[in-house]
Image (spheres, rainbow, N blue to C red):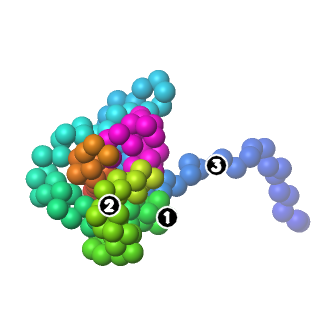
Amino acid sequence: MADIKQPVSSQPQGTAPMQAGGNKNAKNCPIGVDGKRDWSFGLFDCFARCGLCCWSVWCPCVVYSKNRQRLRSLQTQGTPLANGGETYDSHCCIYGGLDITGYSWIMQLRTREEVRERYGIRGDAIGDCFASWCCRPCTLTQERREIELEENSF
């Protein structure tokens, strides 16, 4: 006698998509009705990380380059860089060259915007421009600390 198969009476259930990356709001900052939140650290909280703040003052090209590399790794690989990025690369050299002329802050604008977009942080291009131009070390430190929160959540 042949086995009689019962008809399928339900559809297979989907599973939740896999999340790439770590916790993008590791400090659980409140999210507003606009779906955005504030930075995890204030602009002038840079002094809480004195060593990083000093690097941002005296070697901003290195901090900028490492921020950029670390953010790219999180965006493309979904994982932090094992060694925190290279100290010197082409972006570091370009930033350093522009720093001599006083225009290095312009390079920070796109990276700052990408950090805000990735973490759902309130802000706009005008605010980014003003903050980067007026207080470059503070913005570099703020961006690094935001990236590190996600990296540390892995």
Identify the mark nearer the N-term, 1 or 3.
3
47 vs 70: above or below: above
Image: magenta residue range: 112-132
Which of the pair 23/35 is nearer the observer?
35
Identify the mark nearer the N-term, 2 or 1.
1
What numbered label is drawn on residue 146? none
Identify the mark nearer the N-term, 3 or 2.
3
Q: Amino acid at mark 2?
A: Thr
Q: Residue at x 24, y 37 (%)?
A: 42
Which of the pair 80/65 is nearer the observer?
65
Q: Secondary structure at mark 1?
A: helix
Residue 134 rendering spot, x and y as whole percentages? 27, 43
Drawn side of residue 10 relative to residue 16, left or right: right
Is residue 80 visible in the rendered image? The answer is no
Residue for badge 1: 76
Q: Residue at x 31, y 56 (%)?
A: 102
Neighbours of disc 2 within 10 Å: few (<14), some (14-19), many (20+): few
Neighbours of disc 3 within 10 Å: few (<14), some (14-19), many (20+): few
Is 18 inside the magenta-drawn segment? no
